[in-house]
Image: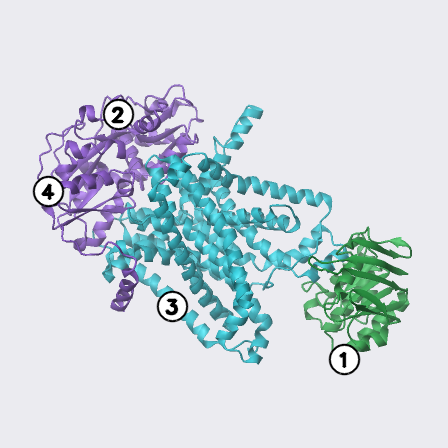
Chain colours: A cyan, B green, C purple
């Protein structure tokens, strides 16, 4: 491949990082096995049944989320209205809001005592069976989180369709269906396998939502079984066995997804000509959007409403709240920066790799966190930290930052990977013939072109960390607590008003960071070019 | 006759608006030249209907065009690149130019004829992605034939082609224009393209079209 | 490799750590569950009260759950920093005792006022309450007065309960049903199944579902109404009294054999079970104190109905059968 710039250091760095992550996971599992003693109990888990249920749930979540995401992206790409950016920001924020917050928001809309059921009782005198519990509840909550996220990613692909292509289509008078099939679909198709894999894995490993809405042991995931094995049965060998099963299944999904070579995407947003579809189609688009808003935005709005009407001032007056806010911001910023470093190392190495095999291999560590159950990861980290002799309380912030970074990594790679690949593909020959150094290539070509994507990635990682409850719950202490942990603790101390207020503030922080950070970073990267 | 009468347009932040007036005769190629950024693409966007002028008139044989959306204008478009959908075959691409509701057998026959007319007989099922630059432009021309619109707008259509292909494609455009009585408007900054094809030549200077 | 990375980690952490400076006072480290050590929990006033007299530093270390504290000590083995575990309950006391990690406390427990006499040599109780289902007078006319009445209600009446594998009240309900019905327990669970809205991981999630009006009843404690009375003089939330009797949760603390602060730990347990220490418990942990506080007990607790009968199960029986009982329950509600 003489058309690619020769970048052995990039490939080497990414390979080294891949190995480090692999070694880390191996060490985590080893540490747990090592700690298992004869005192460990035995656990009784029907793995086949669990796998079946989990795969069913995750598969349905994936299909529904991609469908909903595509419909939303389609409608949003076509419609122009005041507040469109806000709607896009709100949809995108769903993925980074804590699952608990979304789940309770969902319930206040769709629950047995939710707005919709209350309205139905007032209007028609009858309530209905709430869809928010059991498998339908899990799917509803997951599609809210993941469908909106898929919509945001796919919208970016549609917004990047070259102007000339749209002009040609419009001048040919393509029908709305032809427009979708000929222009949109080729732009979307490439993103679907990777996006689908991420959604599948998220749903496969989903923990709080499945436990809250699942209704009971019938709708369990492997993660719950692992939690039980670790906590109640103290069956560490069994936990490792379950973890290996999960890693195996997830690796299979990742490999399957990697087998589809992603269709490269365009580099940036194009200024697209105004091309409205016919009136009936526009009605359909508005319907999709309004349904999306009811489905996605209303639960979030209800969280805001509940939070801002209850106990807001009391929470703002607590020193603990501001300490937790500070901790959250420091942890979030640290993990965002660490994620950026890790994602750049991996994505730059991947885009510089010649062989498909190497590319697949360098894509795998991105999913490490999704494949390794959080309970196992934190338990292993805990044991590893102990072997280093550092007090656990002292190591906690570092562990939380590392774990949060790994958690954000698949999204970071999904954000930075395609544009980096596109740069290499379209500018590779030029870069090679100019004999640019790797550093110059990064600073004068990749970094400026990536400005917006880096901003989006930092925002994603920051918000993920801001909303994390899985890792912090296992490592937080009374001196070290983030906002979600404080929220959860308030809920556990009967202070449900405080919890609602914290949830609302958390949501506001998330949306502000998510909408604001990419713009800020883009401005900075533009300024540095002048 | 295609006639633009003082089409006024300004992009956001542009202080001095464009004022475009031109006449293009049927069966002739009317060339537009001008420096980069002088407004050539803006003129084509106005004629094709992607943007609307602040004031002015645009008529074809006395009929108003400004009220029509891009897809309803009697206009076909040929750009420098991106004219075809790469995942479709040559015949599928060309068939996008057929009027809606054309019966399938008739359509197939028309597509085959059009491909033959542009010198691509036998290329029907080939993927657009596997065609050369010149072949792609020919498929786009075949599609233009099937659309059968009286105005053809060309935006640097030969720039990406080698000399030999450029010459033959150019000749094909000239021949089709005469044969089908098209009002062909060619935007180009290549003097030899203009010399070889154009019956009339305008240059954009300071936002206005000047007859050369 | 380990050394190099630990050095790097230590350097990294040096800036972050504010607690690692040297102390000349003795330190008592107690592992407890999250809520106990939180800023709203009893941990804060207890630390203040004990440090005022002990000439020591009390250090709470919170794990995510009470069973998490035990697992952590088990993982840490002899090298654990913990001197004491606080927050286990009678349901898992047997398993904790079997680990052999706990030392005898040697304290006189005769002044305690609990349902039943307390004779445990290793564990010291510090609060208790009975498991019970909450109902809301605004949405329900009359609560069921037994499991069988609850089962007989319309399927529309939904309860939120907790997973016995992750939440102590969930485990408590399991034992409650077992203590009341013995071999008939699966039958009761099958009857309850259509009423179960959801089985949550933690108490807090199901209680939030109840407060949001999603569930008509929730498994909680007979003392839960005290919070609402105390907080907003809200008397609408009540515990349903069941004629079968109620199973108690008695929370306990135990000193670890590995501790080098045995005397200090014993002093703390004495303080914890004194009137002074106990006065902190009710309005922070929302449980009954284990000594009679008389007038000092907050009025919110004074009028709470008490079960007529307290059910019990033998500790050895629990330890031996818990796994089988959980399987039995999961199979019945599936």
Q: Distance between the residues labelled 4 and 2?
A: 32 Å
Along the line of sight, the residue nearer the viewer: C233 or A175: C233
Q: Distance between the residues labelled 4 and 1?
A: 98 Å
Provide the secondary structure element on which disc 2 rests. helix
Rendered image: mark on residue B163:
1
| Image position of A367 (left or right of A123) | left
Nearer to us of marks 4 and 1 is 1
Marks 3/1 same chain: no
Marks 4/1 same chain: no
| Image position of A324 (left or right of B94) | left
Residue holding disc 3: A19
Rendered image: mark on residue C104:
4
Q: Which chain is indicated by disc 3?
A: A
| Image position of A115 (left or right of C17) | right
Q: Are marks 4 and 2 in contact (CB under 8 Å)?
A: no
Q: Which quadrant holds residue C278?
A: top left
Q: Please tell me how crowded label 2 is: few (under 14), some (14-19), or many (20+) other residues with Cα within 10 Å.
A: many
Q: Which quadrant holds residue C35?
A: top left
Nearer to us of marks 4 and 2 is 2
User: Residue at 44% of width from left, 43% of height from top?
Assistant: A505
User: Taking the image as drawn, is residue B109 in sight?
Assistant: no
Provide the secondary structure element on which disc 1 rests. helix
């Amino acid at each position: 491949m003489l058309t690619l710039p020769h970048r052995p250091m990039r490939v080497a760095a990414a390979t080294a990082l891949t190995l480090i992550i692999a070694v880390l996971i191996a060490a985590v599992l080893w540490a747990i096995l090592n700690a298992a003693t004869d005192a460990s109990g035995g656990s009784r888990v029907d793995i086949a049944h669990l796998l079946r249920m989990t795969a069913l749930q995750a598969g349905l979540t994936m299909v529904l989320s991609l469908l909903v995401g595509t419909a939303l992206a389609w409608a949003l790409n076509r419609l122009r209205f005041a507040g469109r950016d806000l709607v896009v920001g709100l949809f995108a924020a769903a993925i980074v809001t804590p699952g608990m917050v979304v789940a309770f928001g969902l319930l206040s809309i769709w629950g047995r005592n939710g707005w919709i059921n209350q309205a139905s009782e007032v209007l028609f005198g009858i309530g209905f069976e709430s869809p928010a519990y059991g498998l339908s509840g899990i799917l509803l909550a997951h599609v809210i989180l993941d469908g909106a996220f898929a919509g945001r990613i796919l919208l970016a692909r549609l917004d990047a369709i070259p102007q000339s292509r749209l002009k040609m289509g419009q001048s040919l008078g393509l029908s709305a269906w032809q427009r979708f099939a000929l222009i949109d679909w080729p732009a979307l198709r490439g993103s679907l396998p990777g996006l689908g894999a991420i959604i599948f894995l998220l749903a496969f490993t989903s923990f709080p939502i499945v436990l809250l809405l699942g209704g009971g042991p019938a709708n369990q995931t492997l993660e719950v079984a692992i939690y039980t094995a670790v906590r109640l049965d103290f069956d560490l060998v069994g936990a490792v066995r379950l973890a290996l099963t999960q890693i195996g299944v997830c690796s299979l999904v990742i490999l399957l997804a990697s087998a589809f070579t992603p269709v490269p995407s365009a580099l940036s947003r194009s200024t697209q000509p105004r091309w409205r579809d016919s009136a009936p189609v526009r009605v359909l688009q508005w319907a999709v959007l309004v349904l999306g808003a009811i489905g996605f935005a209303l639960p979030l709005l209800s969280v805001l409403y509940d939070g801002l009407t209850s106990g807001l001032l009391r929470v703002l007056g607590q020193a603990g709240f501001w300490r937790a806010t500070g901790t959250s911001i420091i942890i979030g910023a640290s993990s965002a920066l660490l994620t950026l470093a890790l994602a750049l190392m991996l994505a730059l190495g991947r885009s510089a790799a010649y062989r498909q095999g190497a590319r697949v291999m360098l894509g795998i560590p991105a999913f490490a966190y999704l494949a390794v159950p959080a309970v196992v990861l934190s338990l292993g980290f805990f044991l590893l930290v102990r072997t280093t002799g550092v007090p656990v309380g002292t190591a906690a912030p570092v562990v939380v930052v590392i774990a949060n970074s790994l958690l954000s990594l698949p999204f970071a790679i999904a954000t930075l990977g395609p544009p980096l690949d596109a740069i290499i593909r379209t500018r590779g020959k030029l870069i090679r013939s100019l004999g640019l150094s790797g550093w110059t290539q990064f600073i004068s070509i990749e970094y400026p072109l990536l400005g917006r994507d880096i901003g989006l990635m930092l925002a994603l990682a920051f918000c993920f960390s801001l909303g994390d409850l899985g890792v912090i719950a296992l490592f937080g202490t009374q001196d070290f607590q983030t906002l979600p942990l404080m929220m959860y603790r308030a809920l556990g101390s009967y202070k449900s008003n405080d919890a609602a207020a914290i949830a609302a503030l958390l949501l506001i922080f998330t949306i502000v960071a998510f909408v604001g950070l990419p713009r800020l970073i883009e401005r900075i990267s533009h300024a540095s070019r002048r | 006759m295609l006639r633009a009468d003082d089409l006024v347009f300004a992009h956001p932040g542009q202080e001095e608006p464009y004022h475009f007036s031109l006449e293009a005769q049927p069966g002739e190629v009317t060339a537009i030249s001008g420096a980069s950024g002088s407004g050539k693409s803006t003129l084509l966007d106005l004629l094709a209907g992607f943007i609307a002028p602040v004031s002015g008139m645009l008529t074809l044989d006395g009929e108003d065009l400004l009220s029509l959306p891009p897809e309803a204008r009697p206009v076909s478009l040929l750009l420098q690149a991106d004219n075809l959908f790469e995942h479709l075959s040559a015949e599928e691409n060309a068939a996008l130019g057929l009027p809606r509701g054309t019966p399938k057998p008739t359509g197939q026959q028309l597509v085959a004829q059009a491909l033959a007319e542009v010198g691509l007989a036998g290329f029907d099922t080939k993927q657009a992605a596997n065609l050369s630059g010149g072949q792609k432009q020919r498929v786009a021309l075949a599609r233009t034939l099937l659309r059968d619109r009286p105005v053809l707008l060309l935006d640097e259509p030969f720039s990406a082609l080698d000399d030999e292909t450029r010459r033959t494609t150019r000749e094909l455009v000239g021949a089709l224009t005469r044969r089908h009585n098209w009002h062909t408007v060619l935007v180009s900054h290549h003097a030899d393209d203009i010399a070889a094809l154009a019956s009339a030549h305008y240059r954009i200077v300071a936002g206005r079209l000047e007859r050369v | 490799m380990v050394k190099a990375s630990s050095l790097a980690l230590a350097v990294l952490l040096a800036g972050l750590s504010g607690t690692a400076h040297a102390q000349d006072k003795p330190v008592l480290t107690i592992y407890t569950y999250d809520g106990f050590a939180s800023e709203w929990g009893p941990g804060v006033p207890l630390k203040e009260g004990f440090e005022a007299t002990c000439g020591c530093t009390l250090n709470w270390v919170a794990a995510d759950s009470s069973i998490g504290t035990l697992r952590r000590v088990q993982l840490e083995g002899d090298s654990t920093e913990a001197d004491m575990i606080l927050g286990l309950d009678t349901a898992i006391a047997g398993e904790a005792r079997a680990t052999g990690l706990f030392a005898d406390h040697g304290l006189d427990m005769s002044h305690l006022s609990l349902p039943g006499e307390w004779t445990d040599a290793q564990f010291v109780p510090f609060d208790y309450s009975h498991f019970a289902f909450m109902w809301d007078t605004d949405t329900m006319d009359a609560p069921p007065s037994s499991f069988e009445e609850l089962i007989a209600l319309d399927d529309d009446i939904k309860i939120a309960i907790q997973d016995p594998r992750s939440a102590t009240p969930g485990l408590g309900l399991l034992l409650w049903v077992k203590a009341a019905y013995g071999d008939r327990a699966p039958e009761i669970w099958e009857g309850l199944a259509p009423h179960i809205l959801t089985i949550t991981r933690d108490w807090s999630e199901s209680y939030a579902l109840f407060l949001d009006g999603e569930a008509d009843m929730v498994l909680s404690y007979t003392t839960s109404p005290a919070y609402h009375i105390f907080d907003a003089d809200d008397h609408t939330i009540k515990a349903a009294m069941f004629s079968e009797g109620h199973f108690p949760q008695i929370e306990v603390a135990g000193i670890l054999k590995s501790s080098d602060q045995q005397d200090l730990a014993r002093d703390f347990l004495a303080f914890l079970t004194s009137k002074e220490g106990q006065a902190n418990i009710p309005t922070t942990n929302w449980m009954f104190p284990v000594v009679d506080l008389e007038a000092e007990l907050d009025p919110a607790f004074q009028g709470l109905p008490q079960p007529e009968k307290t059910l019990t199960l033998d500790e050895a029986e629990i330890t031996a059968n818990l796994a089988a009982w959980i399987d039995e329950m999961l199979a019945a509600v599936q």
